[in-house]
Image (tube, helix red, strand yellow):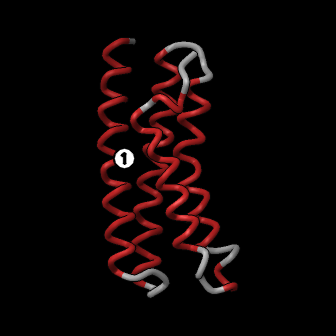
Amino acid sequence: MKDFRELKVWQAHLLTLAVYRATATFPREELYGLTNQLRRSCASIPANLAEGCGRSGDAEFARFCSIAMGSASELEYHLLLARDLNLIEAQVHEELSQQATELKRMLAGLLQKLRAES
């Protein structure tokens, strides 16, 4: 069993906090729409990392990392949509998108390592 807080990809938690802050100003009518989708897809990343760390073996952990990767891709799209709907400024989109891209790179590296060890 691994401690998820010791993983470098755990910075996904910081990205989740940033997404929550960015969506705090979204219109009320988006609360159950894009606000919810952005928050859920982003929070799913560290949640899957934490759950995967609690499982037995690298193969199971890799499966949860793969799910986290899918959530990171979903987050990228929702950020793009929020920008195009003028719900977040271009600069905020760029910062969050860069963080998501970096997180996906780290997840890819972790997945590669886990699969090599399996």
Q: Residue at x 46, y 86 (%)?
A: 85
Tell me the quarter of the picture where residue 77 sits.
bottom left
Find numbered disc 1 in the image and state the secondary structure of the residue it sits on: helix
Q: Is residue 79 left or right of residue 53?
A: left
Residue at image point 45% right, 80% down: 88
Residue 37, image x, y percentages: 59, 65
Percent coordinates x, y for residue 117 in the rendering? 35, 12
Answer above or below: position of 72 versus 19: above
Residue 70 is situated, as x and y percent measured from the top left of the image, at 46, 47
The residue under the point 58% across, 33% down is 50
Q: Quadrant of the C terminus?
A: top left
From this view, report whether residue 4 is shown above or below residue 72: above
Q: Position of residue 7 (x, y in %)?
A: 44, 31
The N terminus appears in which quarter of the rendering? Answer: top right
The answer to whether 98 appears left or right of 66 in the picture is: left
* Residue 68 located left or right of residue 56: left
- What number of labels is visible? 1
Q: Which residue corresponds to mark 1?
A: 103
The amino acid type, in three-letter code, at marker 1 is Leu
x 58%, y 65%: residue: 20
Q: Is residue 87 above or below residue 70?
A: below
In the depicted structure, whether residue 56 falls above or below residue 8: above
Frontmost residue, 64 versus 96: 96
Badge 1 crowding class, 10 Å Cα cut-off, few under 14, some 14 to 19, many 20 or more, is many
Q: Nearer the viewer, residue 74 or 12?
A: 12
